[in-house]
Amino acid sequence: MFSFARYLFSCALLLTLMLTDSPARAEWSWTFPFYGADSGAARTDQSGNPSGATAKPAAGETLPDSTTQTGKGDSAIVSQPASVLKPETGSAEADQPTVQKLTSPPRALSAFTPEHKLGSMILEEDTQWSGSLQIEGMVTVSPLATLTVMPGAVIRFAANSGILVYGRIVLKGTPESPLFISSLYDEPHPSDWNGIFLIGTEKNNVFEHLVIQGADTAIQASFSAFEANGIRISNSDTAMKLGNSTATVRNSALFSSVNGIQAVKSEVDLETMAIDQNRNALSLQSSSLTAVNVRLQNNTNTALVADRSQLKLDRMLFTSNLNGLKTTECDGSITNSRFLSNKETAALFTASHLKFSDNHVSGSRVGLQLDDNSPALWRNSISGNGIYNLLYLGEERYFAGGNWLGLNLPENGDILVFSKQPGALMTAPLLGIDPHPPVGSDSIKAAD
């Protein structure tokens, strides 16, 4: 018993010596886990670097030629040899996947030497611009002033820059000397710069013979009016956005943008135009649209969407869009138009009291879809569509006689009609000949 007590006292004394400062203690290592330098699992410090190693090369030492770094912050690209990316030591770091964040290549600035550089300013009196200008900021045209840009001028806008018009703007190029408006980049992208905003100006705002590229909204009008002729808008988020405004556009092209024209409670008058290769071409809410000789082509969504609007469409061309036309609670007329090879539905009408006459509809998955008996159809050529020439989903009886549906024999199933309620759709009498047969070339000459 006495020997055991002495043993406990010896242990306590030894532990006290271990916990007090002594020359011997300096030689002990209390590192956890107890890995040595050659154990196969290197220790790391709080910054993630191997313990005892520096994060930078030693003096006179350079990184291997195959190690390069570009960019800053999270966008840095790090390219390292395989031996660095995957250590052969069997460490835990070797088992972790290497994530590399790639950055887009830098965009090339336009080779542009402006004659004038302007920042944010307010124009209190009539002002005239000519030559080449670079705008860095918002230029505001006050209510009593007019900004006039002369033919041949070149204007490039920096990011978050644009023109705000409370007074009047006249951008008046000529066919021989158009205006050019874009961003600072050689290849403009949508939203590189803000755009031109008209607010509360119903004066004679004019846009003639000019090119606009790379804007967020190229022309935006709120409680305003403008006329445009011979303009080309591309590579923008939205070409034209109208709210409680009036716009007349002639001989123009809106293309390669996200949205062509968006109008809410506005009056839009279009003639001889092309709205091509956008995501959405035309969108109307509680608005009126008069359009003559307008081509809507290769738009990846529905070309024209109209909700509670008044339509007067003549000599239109809807071709190679996802859908051609969708209307909801609309009134008006659609005449002498062609709906060709739209991927899904050429035209879909819901609660729309429309006169649809003298049109050609072919090459789509569904020709016409009627959700009710509101539209009136006559003297149309509706044939050669994939599933249905005429799809009627209404509940009440509907008369659709006086049209060409492919073959003039009602008992022949090739006319491709379907009615949700059996017997509700009446197609007789069918026309004996096609009133609008296909032609070898498109007769509509919209602006290219």
Image: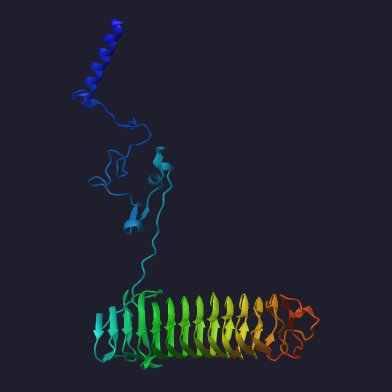
| Colour scheme of the rendered structure | rainbow
> Could you say which is closer to the camera, residue 26 or residue 109?
26
Q: Which x, y percent locates residue 296?
A: 54, 83
Q: Is residue 384 above or below residue 38?
A: below
Residue 26 in which image quadrant: top left
Residue 237 in which image quadrant: bottom left
- Specify whether 57 is left or right of 358: left
> Could you say which is closer to the camera, residue 445 or residue 393?
393
Residue at position x 66%, y 77% from top? 366
Q: Is residue 234 in view from this perspective?
A: no
Residue at position x 36%, y 82% from top? 196
Q: Which x, y percent locates residue 228?
A: 42, 90
Residue at position x 40%, y 56% from top? 101
- Specify whether 382 is left or right of 268: right
Question: Where, quadrant-wise, is the N terminus in this rendering?
Answer: top left
Q: Which x, y percent locates residue 49?
A: 31, 43
